[in-house]
Amino acid sequence: MATPVQMPQPGNTVEECLLVEWAVPEGKPVTKGQVVCTIETDKATFEVESPADGTLVRQFVSAGEVAPVLTTIGAVGEPGEDVSDLAPTSAAPSQPAGRKAAKEPKKEMREEPRAESPAPQDPQSAASAQRADGRRAVSPRARKLAARLGVDPTGLQGSGPQGRVVSDDVQAAAGRLTPLARAEQAATGRTAQAPSGLGGRARARDLVEAAPQEAPPEEIPLTQIRARIAERMRASLAQHAQLTLHGSADATALLALRRRFKEARSADEEAPNVTLNAMICAAAVWTLPAFPELNATFDPEAEKLVRYSQVHLGVAVDTDRGLMVPVVRNAHAMRLSELTGAIAQTAAEARSGAIDPDRLYGGTFTITNLGALGVERFTPVLNSPQVSILGVCAIEERPVPDGAGGVRFQPALGLSLTIDHQVVDGAPAARFLQALAQSIGTFDFALAQQAV
């Protein structure tokens, strides 16, 4: 009896998955535990293994299609076995949200031999052969022939459908070169344009350098993950009144502590690799409980605000598949070394595509860091339904008063805080920024209150 291959459910919140590709062709033998296909949710990629030894008799879902979780996508059995009873009874899988069906490739019209005296073209038909940039439409075959013969096809009068330049037009133009022009063309590769000789023949002085051909624009269909990101960004801007406040913090203590951690790690590889980002995240989650207005979520339709005593920190991670925001739960209760390890682990899992989708939901506050890329100020977009998100910017040297009538330069860490102004006022948001800057500026002292 054949064994069904089911679309797994990678997480309680996942309802459907995209079948990216089959690793085993239909009709080929498989062993139990062998990877037979790859699937993708709107956040991560997973591998599906064969449930039994045998032959992959049927693939009920094709690569590029979306199917609900727990749907039978294939069958493993004996060669030639009838597995029609295992076929899913639902309609064909739908295309993923935000994605368009692949376009059928356009077939080039077959070129007809040109008559001795082509009939005059209708002006409207001739005009339709002009591209948006005013140049003549040229068939691919004619373009290749023109490149070989050194003829500029865009200046020719076309005899193809709707005035299109075809290969006969190029061949005829190639025969209208004077002997000297032909020799010059062979030596330099230049093309004939605007013939000035008798009978419309091109002379050597009519040859010009061929214009470089522009590469056609690349059309890239959105992946399911990219479409989901786009959908969430649009929804966030549509549902929240987003206001961004900018501030800065003295990074002197932060940089000094980072140097000490690096020195300790150089002496002992087992020492925690505490990064600047981890220290900033620690300062934020240790400060946040005093500002419950910002550690909250908001449902505009229900007009309900939910505040949390625990800080479940969302950390924006740049991956090959797009932006992901894994959540570190109860981050406020972690020591610095614990938080450092948790952030590094979740980021690594997100980049590898192996993260549990359930760990991408349930955050109460998000931090996104573009400082390493030199960004001085930016406007983070709220990670809906959260009401605040902190953007970490680059560290810049800024002049500050030295207390003696002069100035000194101080490393300043830029901070950009976006809030939902529907439920968070500017004053408490500004006070949080002020308190966070104080925590960062005195991070050595703050660290003494929290065991590493």
Image: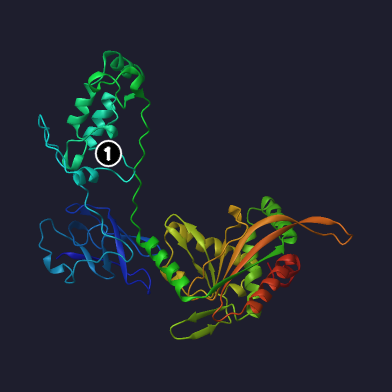
Q: Toward which corner of the image does residue 368 lie, by quadrant?
A: bottom right
Q: Quadrant of the C terminus?
A: bottom right
Q: Where is residue 427? Give x, y as percent.
A: 66, 78
Q: Is residue 447 shown to the viewer in this render?
A: yes
Q: Is residue 196 above or below residue 272?
A: above
Q: Residue at x 76, y 68 (%)?
A: 445
Name the residue nearer the viewer: 74 or 382.
Answer: 382
Residue designated by label 1: 136
Q: Toward which corner of the image does residue 272 lie, by quadrant?
A: bottom right
**Residue positioned most to the right:** 404
Q: Is residue 407 above or below residue 429?
A: above
Q: Is residue 399 left or right of residue 42?
A: right
Q: Is residue 189 shown to the viewer in this render?
A: no
Q: Residue at x 37, y 25 (%)?
A: 208
How many residues crowd around disc 1 within 10 Å: few (fewer than 14), some, or many (20 or more)?
Answer: many
Q: Quadrant of the N terminus?
A: bottom left
Q: Where is residue 316? Give x, y as percent.
A: 52, 63
Q: Is residue 425 left or right of residue 218?
A: right
Name the residue nearer the viewer: 418 or 317.
Answer: 418
Colour approach in the figure: rainbow
SS of the residue under disc 1 = loop
Q: Toward which corner of the image does residue 93 lie, by quadrant?
A: bottom left
Name the residue nearer the viewer: 133 or 15.
Answer: 133
Q: Where is residue 377? Give x, y as percent.
A: 61, 60
Q: Is residue 288 left or right of residue 41?
A: right
Q: Where is residue 237? Give x, y as percent.
A: 47, 71
Counting the numbered discs, the total is 1
Dot 1 amino acid type: Arg
